[in-house]
Image: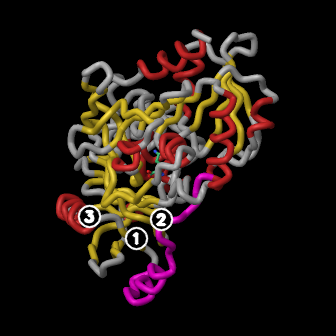
């Protein structure tokens, strides 16, 4: 490595006062956010560009990240959405025929501050035990007291509406305009591959800003409604809950993913809660309790729907449960063609076990 490439020292400070020393990677600077970890072995570029991670600093459990570089097409949105990255070996060298760039240069271009050389095993064990908390990474300031002060000013993820920040400002369409299946998509930070999964099945989509009222969505004459994934806390999104209540009144099919499930629950008076440290990875076992079949799923969430309230609800049926911790992974309404899952069936990255859910959504629309 040439002298100019040798990394500067960097520091990671957790809200509970723990300090980790490492080396800078990506942009030189400081960044803050909620620390979380992803256990996936592959698909790092898709993870970094997933808007559901907006506001979070992510620890990558896999020991080597960056070794296959980055490729323009492997994105879930138009930019990196994580606030920072923590790794054991963040690699400048890469090897892949199709790659366009190194992770290092990609992070510099996208203004992403990362820290390399961290004992990620110890750090992940710590977060698993202590739970979600804020953190700061810095490679341009070695004054620990100053950094700690900056960290105290970072808001808690609990109560934050981040979805309206990453939602599309302009309405746009995708797919074949002459299609018989028209789906209105409410965008809270949608991943491109969710849109692809619907376009591949022949839908014509119109994607709307998170804050769009039902009467505006209705003008598109949709056959169904899709409620997307997205970052932050679902609880403050009262405007979205109102829209979903109106959609349910229309009795047209509705499918929600992740934040979409949390909003569907809130629209049915089921509260959501902040999880201890969330689920993020590519191998979370889920059981479909309607068919009895298991799926290995891609997940990325730090909030969940209240299991007791779901079980007590007369109108909500549980369709999927998590086999690790019994949390609610899927629900459907008894009196409306509306359902949702807490995980990511488009699964980029991840196994494709759950893509049948898009077929079920299309089935619901075609049956009408
Ligand atoms: N992937 C998502 O949609 C995440 C939903 C929500 N922000 C959570 O962390 O639970």
In the depicted structure, whether residue 120 falls above or below residue 20: above
Q: Are marks 2 and 1 in contact (CB under 8 Å)?
A: yes
Q: Is residue 160 left or right of residue 322?
A: right
In the depicted structure, whether residue 72 falls above or below residue 80: above
Magenta stretch containing residue 116, yes or no? no
Q: Which residue is mark 1?
A: 134
Quadrant of residue 276 in the image?
bottom left
Gap between marks 3 and 2 measured at Cα:
15 Å
> Which numbered disc flags the more N-terminal residue, 2 or 1?
1
Q: What's the residue at 63%, 34% (across, down)?
A: 248
Residues drawn in magenta: 141-163
117 vs 245, nearest the viewer: 245
Whether residue 343 is visible to the viewer of this picture, yes or no, is yes
226 vs 115, nearest the viewer: 226
Residue 357 location, x and y as percent?
A: 44, 22
Marker disc for residue 127: 3
Magenta stretch containing residue 158, yes or no? yes
Q: Which residue is mark 2?
A: 157
Q: What's the residue at 36%, 30% (across, down)?
A: 319
Image quarter in which the N terminus is found: bottom left
Please identify the residue farthest to the front as the structure is shown.
314
Marker disc for residue 193: none
Q: Is mark 2 within 8 Å of ligand 1?
A: yes
Residue 258 location, x and y as percent?
A: 46, 41
Gap between marks 2 and 1 measured at Cα:
8 Å
Quadrant of residue 285 in the image?
top left
Residue 183 location, x and y as percent?
A: 66, 24
In the depicted structure, whether residue 155 falls above or below residue 367: below
Q: Is residue 317 left or right of residue 153?
A: left
SS class of the residue under badge 2?
A: loop
């Amino acid at each position: 490595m040439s002298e100019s490439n040798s990394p500067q020292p960097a520091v990671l400070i957790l809200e509970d006062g723990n300090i980790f020393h490492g080396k800078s990677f990506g942009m030189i600077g400081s960044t803050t956010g909620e620390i979380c970890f992803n256990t996936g072995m592959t698909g790092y570029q898709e993870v970094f560009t997933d808007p559901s991670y907006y506001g979070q600093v992510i620890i990558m459990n896999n020991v080597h990240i960056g070794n296959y570089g980055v490729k323009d097409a492997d994105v879930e949105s138009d930019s990196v959405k994580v606030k920072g990255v923590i790794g054991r070996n963040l690699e400048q060298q890469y090897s892949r025929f199709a790659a366009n760039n190194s992770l290092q240069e990609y992070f510099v271009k996208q203004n992403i501050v990362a820290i390399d050389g961290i004992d990620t095993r110890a750090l992940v064990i710590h977060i698993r035990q202590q739970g979600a908390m804020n953190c700061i990474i810095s490679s341009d300031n070695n004054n620990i007291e100053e950094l700690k002060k900056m960290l105290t000013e970072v808001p808690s993820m609990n109560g934050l509406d981040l979805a309206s920040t990453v939602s599309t400002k302009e309405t746009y369409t995708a797919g074949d305009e002459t299609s018989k299946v028209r789906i209105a998509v409410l965008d809270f930070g949608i991943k491109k591959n969710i849109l692809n999964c619907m376009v591949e099945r022949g839908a014509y989509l119109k994607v709307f800003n998170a804050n769009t009222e039902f009467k505006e969505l209705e003008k598109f004459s949709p056959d169904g409604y899709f409620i997307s994934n997205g970052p932050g806390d679902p609880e403050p999104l009262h405007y979205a809950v109102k829209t979903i209540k109106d959609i349910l009144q229309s009795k047209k099919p509705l499918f929600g993913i992740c934040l979409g499930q949390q909003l569907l629950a809130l629209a049915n008076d089921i509260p959501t809660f902040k999880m201890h440290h969330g689920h993020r990875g590519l191998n979370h076992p889920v059981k479909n309790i309607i068919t009895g079949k298991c799926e290995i799923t891609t997940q990325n969430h730090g909030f969940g729907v209240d299991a007791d309230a779901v079980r007590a609800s007369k109108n909500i049926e549980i369709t999927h449960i998590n086999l690790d911790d019994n949390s609610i992974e899927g629900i459907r309404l008894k009196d409306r063609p509306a359902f949702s899952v807490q995980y990511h069936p488009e699964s980029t990255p991840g196994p494709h076990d759950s893509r049948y859910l898009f077929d079920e959504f299309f089935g619901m629309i075609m049956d009408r």
